[in-house]
Image (cartoon, helix red, strand yellow):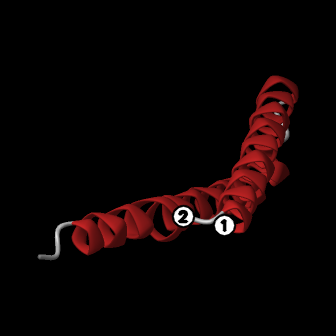
Amino acid sequence: MNKKFRQIRNTIAVILFAFGIGIFILSQVVERNNLIKWQEPITLVLWVYITLVFLYIIFLNAIPLVCNYFKKSKL
């Protein structure tokens, strides 16, 4: 893989990690303060986050590894 692709992949990973920490802190604050109105939007944001992480894993990690494996195994 080229250097630019790895840099993009690492940048997206850092952004998703920071977003996950923010969601975790926000959910803890909402739970401790018993803010009922905020629970449904946080659930929606959590589902969006899980979807983004899943797409990141599939498209930026798994598919390039599989493609490289099959390129190397050609005879």
Residue at 72% x, 60% y: name it.
45
Give the foreground label among 1 and 2.
Answer: 2
Q: Residue furthest left?
A: 75
Structural crowding at the residue carrying mark 1, measured as other residues with C-alpha within 10 Å and reported as few (<14), some (14–19) or many (≥20): few
Structural crowding at the residue carrying mark 2, measured as other residues with C-alpha within 10 Å and reported as few (<14), some (14–19) or many (≥20): few
Quarter of the C terminus within the rendering: bottom left
Q: Nearer the viewer, residue 69 or 72?
A: 72
Q: Secondary structure at mark 1?
A: helix
**Does residue 71 appear to the left or right of 53 in the view shown?**
left
Q: Position of residue 33 (x, y in %)?
A: 88, 27
Q: Position of residue 61 (x, y in %)?
A: 48, 59
Type of the residue with mark 2: Met
How far apart are the alpha carbons under marks 1 and 2? 7 Å
Q: Which residue is mark 2?
A: 1
Give the answer, above or below, for where 7 lies relative to 20. below
**Does residue 61 appear to the left or right of 11 in the view shown?**
left
Type of the residue with mark 1: Phe
Q: Position of residue 40 (x, y in %)?
A: 71, 57
Residue at 77% x, 43% y: name it.
23
Q: Residue furthest front?
A: 75
**Does residue 69 appear to the left or right of 9 in the view shown?**
left
Q: Nearer the viewer, residue 4 or 8?
A: 4
Q: Which residue is mark 1?
A: 5
Give the answer, above or below, for where 55 lies relative to 49. below
> Do residues under tags 1 and 2 come within 8 Å of each other at their CB atoms?
yes
Q: Nearer the viewer, residue 15 or 63?
A: 63
Residue at 65% x, 54% y: name it.
46
Q: Nearer the viewer, residue 41 or 52?
A: 52
Q: How many marks?
A: 2
